[in-house]
Amino acid sequence: MDDHNFFRWRQDVLNIFQSVTEADEITKILRQQTELMEFDYFSLCIRHPVPFTRPKTSLRSSYPQSWLDHYHAANYFAIDPVLRPENFMRGNLPWDDALFGDTQEFWDAARDHGLRRGISQCVMSPNRALGFLSVSRTANKGKILADDLLQMRLQYLGELSLMTLTRLNDSTMDAVTLKLSKREREILQWTGEGKTSAEIAIILSISENTVNFHQKNMQKKFNAPNKTQIACYAAAIGII
């Protein structure tokens, strides 16, 4: 790997992103940069951690429209292995038969639409939004950058994209925000530890009714049916 060329590229790309004034410019930059790496398509999927069952998700992409339509119609968001938490933790995901082992129909459909070779890089923003920058090409063979260089470039492009969207106050980066009192945070922390209302009351030297009062208020703020889900949501977005 040519370190000098990478650091020069990194500075050039940073300058480009710092000059961005509109979110749509990011799509153009990603298209240009991924094409320079000899990929035909890219997608940037941003997904927030809550709600768990239907998380807020957005997509910027140069994929064929026929594939995007099929992806949404078949609800592939629900089975796409790139979006699984265990795969996100790996960070760098080359597309291969192992990754799509239990979603063969999805993998076959992607290749039928021209997405035959690809890789995804996963990054996280400070507000816990997850970014999945994927690149693909129509040919199975052909020169691609060395694995370590490609991984670093994709990671940097993903990070800069999320940072720039945040700087521009773009709605795709809006996360669940909650204003909680100090007492509510204390109760949340102990709820997350599995303590009952009675136990929390003893720990905080307040009445059980006061604990329940605060928990009911937090249920309304989180739009959650019970205190367990409150704690789960709070942990997912980094409150506790």
Image (cartoon, helix red, strand yellow):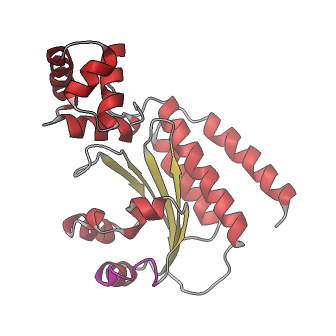
Q: Does the magenta stretch include residue 201?
A: no
Q: Name the residue: 65% across, 41% down.
A: 16
Q: Name the residue: 81% across, 50% down.
A: 8
Q: Is the magenta stretch mostly helix, strand or loop?
A: loop
Q: Name the residue: 20% across, 34% down.
A: 227
Residue 228: x and y in percent read 22, 39
Is the residue 230 above or below the residue 29 in the image? above
Q: Name the residue: 39% across, 30% down.
A: 239
Residue 19 visible at all: yes
Q: Which of 40 and 227 is in front in this view?
A: 227
- Viewport quadrant of the C terminus: top left
Q: In which quarter of the image is residue 184?
A: top left
Residue 160: x and y in percent read 59, 43
Is the residue 15 above or below the residue 32 in the image? above
Residue 137: x and y in percent read 52, 76
Q: In which quarter of the image is residue 77?
A: bottom left
Is the residue 71 above or below the residue 217 in the image? below
Query: What's the magenta region?
Result: 97-105
